[in-house]
C-alpha cells in the first residue's frame, strides 16, 4: 500500500457567528466573541477524528498546520503528522490559501478542511482541481457540495477513500455574501467547480433555489394553515427562508428572511434572535413550537444556517414540537430530512423519530423520513 498524504486544515473561527446570530464570522470575530461566541470548528474536528478507524491510518501521514489550525487536535488523537505550515496570528483566509499551496508542494493526495463555505472557497482558490477536497461541516451556512453530512460521516468518507472504495465527482463551491446576508439579502455565487470525494449517502448537495409558477400561492396556503392553527400563549420560533417568512407576512409583522424570529399571540416579540435570547425566552414559556423549512436539494432542517436553534434550544422545545413546512416542488428535490445539530445524541433521537409530517399546502400534509441523503 502506497503511503497517503492528507492535508488537514482547521479554520479556528469558522462557525463562531452562528449561535450568536451573526450568520457568519468573516470580519466579525471580535463582535462574535463579545456576544459570547465559542469556538466551534475544533469540537467538530475532534468529533471527526474520534470516529476515524485508526487501523486505516497505518499508511497515512497528515500534513498539518501549527496551532490553532489543527496540529494540536491531531496530536491529541495521536495521529501521525508532519507540520508544513505555521499561520499568522490572528489567522486569516490567506493562511488557508498558503497552507493548501504547501500541501500541494508536499504532493498531498487529498485535502480535508474543518470550516464553512468561506473556508471551502479559500481551499479551492489555492488548489483548483489539483487534488480532491472535502469539508468537515463546521461553519454557519455550508451551501457548497463538498461537505460531508456530519463529522462522523466525514470519518467514514476518509476511510473509504483510503481503502480505494470512494469515487470522485465535481461539486459546486457556493459562497454567500456575508455582509448582504447580515442585511437579510440572499445573494450567492458559484465560486468554482471543485473535485470532491463522493459516496452517495455521505456528501451533501449544494443548495438549490426552487422557483415555480405557483410557488408563491402555495407558500400563502401553507402560511394560512399555520397561522390559523397558532394557539394563544404559545411561543413560535420561526426559522429562516421564504416559505417560513410567508407566515410572518400573513401575520403582518416585520421579519428576518435569513434569521430566527419569535412570535407569541401572533405578535413579534423578538426579531433576529440568537441562541442566548431564545434560551432566555424559553425559560418563562410553558409551550413553544419551532417552525422550519428544509434547504432545497440538501434537505437540512437543522445545522445549516440556523445554528441559533442549538441542541439546548431544541431540547427545551422538544422534538414533538417541531413543525416542518415546504412547498411540494422543494420537497421533491430531497429524499430525506437531514439533521446535523452538533450533538450526536440529539441527532440519534431525530433518527429514531424516523419521520416528520410536513405541511405542503392548505390543510395538506405529507410525511418525510429523517435519514441520510441518497444521490
Image: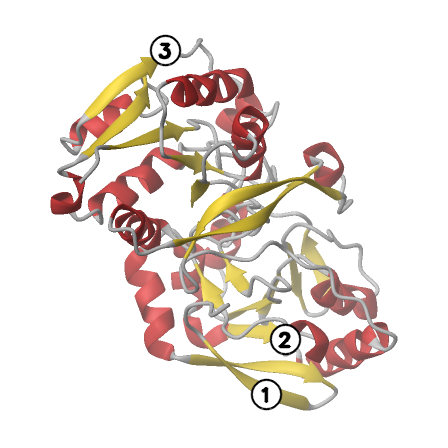
In the picture of the structure, the residue carrying the numbered disc 1 is 366
Residue 203 in picture, x, y percent from top left: 45, 56
Is 10 situated above or below 195? above
Looking at the image, residue 192 sits to the left or right of residue 41; the answer is: right
The residue sitting at 79% across, 79% down in the picture is 218
Element on which disc 1 rests: strand
Residue at the image position 31 percent from the left and 67 percent from the top: 348
Asked if one can make out residue 254 in the rendered structure from this viewpoint, the answer is: yes
Distance (Cα) linking label 3 and label 1: 52 Å
Circle 2 residue: 331
In the rendered image, residue 140, in percent from the top left (x then y), is placed at 54, 43
User: Which badge, 2 or 3, is on the more N-terminal residue?
Assistant: 3
Quadrant for the N terminus in the image: top left
Mark number, residue 86:
3
Q: Residue at x 57, y 46 (%)?
A: 141
- Circle nearer the N terminus (3, 1): 3
Q: Where on the picture, by quarter, is residue 55? A: top left
Amino acid at each position: 500500500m502506497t503511503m497517503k498524504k492528507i492535508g488537514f486544515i482547521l479554520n479556528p473561527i469558522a462557525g463562531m457567528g452562528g449561535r450568536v446570530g451573526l450568520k457568519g464570522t468573516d470580519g466579525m470575530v471580535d463582535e462574535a466573541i463579545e456576544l459570547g461566541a465559542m469556538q466551534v470548528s475544533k469540537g467538530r474536528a475532534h468529533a471527526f477524528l474520534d470516529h476515524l478507524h485508526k487501523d486505516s491510518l497505518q499508511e497515512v501521514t497528515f500534513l498539518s498546520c501549527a496551532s490553532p489550525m489543527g496540529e494540536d487536535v491531531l496530536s491529541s488523537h495521536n495521529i501521525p503528522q508532519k507540520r508544513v505550515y505555521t499561520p499568522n496570528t490572528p489567522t486569516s483566509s490567506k493562511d488557508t490559501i498558503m497552507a493548501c499551496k504547501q500541501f500541494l508542494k508536499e504532493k498531498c493526495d487529498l485535502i480535508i478542511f474543518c470550516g464553512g463555505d468561506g473556508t471551502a472557497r479559500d481551499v479551492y482558490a489555492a488548489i483548483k482541481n489539483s487534488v480532491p477536497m472535502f469539508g468537515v461541516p463546521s461553519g454557519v451556512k455550508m451551501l457548497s457540495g463538498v461537505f460531508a453530512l456530519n463529522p462522523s460521516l466525514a470519518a467514514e468518507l476518509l476511510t473509504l477513500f483510503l481503502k480505494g472504495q470512494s469515487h470522485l465527482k465535481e461539486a459546486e463551491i457556493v459562497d454567500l455574501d456575508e455582509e448582504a446576508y447580515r442585511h437579510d439579502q440572499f445573494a450567492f455565487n458559484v465560486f468554482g467547480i471543485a473535485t470532491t470525494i463522493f459516496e452517495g449517502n455521505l456528501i451533501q448537495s449544494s443548495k438549490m433555489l426552487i422557483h415555480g409558477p405557483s410557488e408563491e400561492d402555495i407558500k400563502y396556503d401553507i402560511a394560512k394553515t399555520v397561522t390559523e392553527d397558532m394557539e394563544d400563549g404559545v411561543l413560535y420560533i420561526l426559522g429562516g427562508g421564504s416559505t417560513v417568512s410567508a407566515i410572518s407576512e400573513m401575520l403582518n409583522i416585520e421579519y428576518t428572511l435569513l434569521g430566527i424570529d419569535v412570535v407569541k399571540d401572533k405578535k413579534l416579540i423578538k426579531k433576529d434572535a440568537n441562541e442566548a435570547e431564545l434560551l432566555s425566552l424559553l425559560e418563562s414559556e410553558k409551550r413553544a413550537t419551532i417552525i422550519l423549512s428544509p434547504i432545497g436539494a440538501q434537505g437540512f432542517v437543522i445545522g445549516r444556517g440556523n445554528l441559533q436553534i442549538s441542541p439546548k434550544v431544541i431540547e427545551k422545545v422538544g422534538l414533538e414540537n417541531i413543525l416542518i413546512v415546504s412547498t411540494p416542488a422543494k420537497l421533491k428535490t430531497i429524499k430525506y430530512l437531514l439533521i446535523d445539530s452538533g450533538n450526536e445524541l440529539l441527532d440519534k433521537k431525530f433518527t429514531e423519530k424516523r419521520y416528520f409530517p410536513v405541511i405542503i399546502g392548505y390543510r395538506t400534509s405529507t410525511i418525510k423520513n429523517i435519514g441520510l441523503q441518497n444521490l
